Image (tube, rainbow, N blue to C red):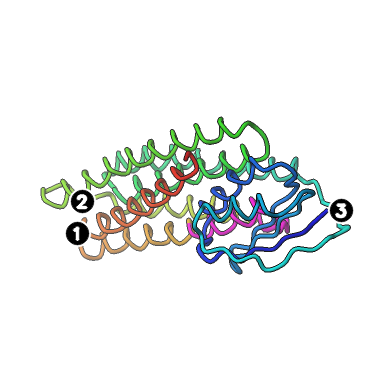
């Protein structure tokens, strides 16, 4: 077996990881992919030559450099079952809070909660794609990626239009207490997800990506809580609209990256 290490400069989030993973799923002989998003390195364990792998990664235009290729006697740790259970757990938590935040956001007239709910939905899609990377055909993965990407873009675009309409109009103030309370529960939920992922102590692809993704969600939750406090303090809906537009933009950015998976 061979171990090849790549330095990939433009690999900084789970979307690039999934893009690479799905591209390499067509290559025979690839046994395991270990991603380090912080160091932007990818370690590939394979039994065939490295040329097809190098060519496939090069086609993604992510500024990759092959650092090394060497033979190895390492025994790969098959932990797919454990990883799948953890990914299912965080997927379900995120989807449940998508429903909760979307419904409470509409009721309380908070675009921050609505936007955060779409971010939760985006997380669910990414975790789902990670689960599909464990099994399933390449065609199936790409098809789901395309549907997920377009669905997110559609919802986020509707959200941005609604933010603009509210900014130009005279909507009632969002219910700041609902914003804060629901976001605190979402923060706790994401904290649980991060704890479960870190508890696994896995250095493998999906787990590390999910940890980084969930850490970003915690930051967004805190942003919505701060926006709720500012709504109350300033007696203005502007902070809610600002956090809403920021999160909607992040959702669209993530959706565009997911759409790359369908190419």
Q: Which residue was labeled with disc 3?
A: 75
User: Label 1 near label 2: C-beta < 8 Å?
Assistant: yes
Left or right, 208 with respect to 257, comes to: right
- Going from N to C along the chain, the mark reached first, 3 or 1, is 3
Q: Nearer the viewer, residue 180 or 127?
A: 127
User: Residue 30: image x %, image y %?
Assistant: 72, 47
Q: Nearer the viewer, mark 3 or mark 1?
A: 3
Q: Nearer the viewer, residue 201 or 179?
A: 201
The residue that appears at 56% across and 40% down in the rendered structure is 129
* Residue 141 seen in this snapshot: yes
Disc 3 element: loop
Q: CA distance from mark 3 to mark 1?
A: 59 Å
Which numbered circle lies on residue 236?
A: 1
Q: Is 189 covered by the magenta stretch?
A: no
Disc 1 element: loop
Q: Which residue was labeled with disc 2?
A: 173
- Going from N to C along the chain, the mark reached first, 2 or 3, is 3
Q: CA distance from mark 2 to mark 3?
A: 59 Å
Region in magenta: 196-216
User: Residue 1: image x %, image y %?
Assistant: 83, 53
Q: Is 200 covered by the magenta stretch?
A: yes
* Furthest residue in direction left, as rendered: 169
Q: Nearer the viewer, mark 2 or mark 3?
A: 3
Left or right, 135 with respect to 125, comes to: right
């Amino acid at each position: 077996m061979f171990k090849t290490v790549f330095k990939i400069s433009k690999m900084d989030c789970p979307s690039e990881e999934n893009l690479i993973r799905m591209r390499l799923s067509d290559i025979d002989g690839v046994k395991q992919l270990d991603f380090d998003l912080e160091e932007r390195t990818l370690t590939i364990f394979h039994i065939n030559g490295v040329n097809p792998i190098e060519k496939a990664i090069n086609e993604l235009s992510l500024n990759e450099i092959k650092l090394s290729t060497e033979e190895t006697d390492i025994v790969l740790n098959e932990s797919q079952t454990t990883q799948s259970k953890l990914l299912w757990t965080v997927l379900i938590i995120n989807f449940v809070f998508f429903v909760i935040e979307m419904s409470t956001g509409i009721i309380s007239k908070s675009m921050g909660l609505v936007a955060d709910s779409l971010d939760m939905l985006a997380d669910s899609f990414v975790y789902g794609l990670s689960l599909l990377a464990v099994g399933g055909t390449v065609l199936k993965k790409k098809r789901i990626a395309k549907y997920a990407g377009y669905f997110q873009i559609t919802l986020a675009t509707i959200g941005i239009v609604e933010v603009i309409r509210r900014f130009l109009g005279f909507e009632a103030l969002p219910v700041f207490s609902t914003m804060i309370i629901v976001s605190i529960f979402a923060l706790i939920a994401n904290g649980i997800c991060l704890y479960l992922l870190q508890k696994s102590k896995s250095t493998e692809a999906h787990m590390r990506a999910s940890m980084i993704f969930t850490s970003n969600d915690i930051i967004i939750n805190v942003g919505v809580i701060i926006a709720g406090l500012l709504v109350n303090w300033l007696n203005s809906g502007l902070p809610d609209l600002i956090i809403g537009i920021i999160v909607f933009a992040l959702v669209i950015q993530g959706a565009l990256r997911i759409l790359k998976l369908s190419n």
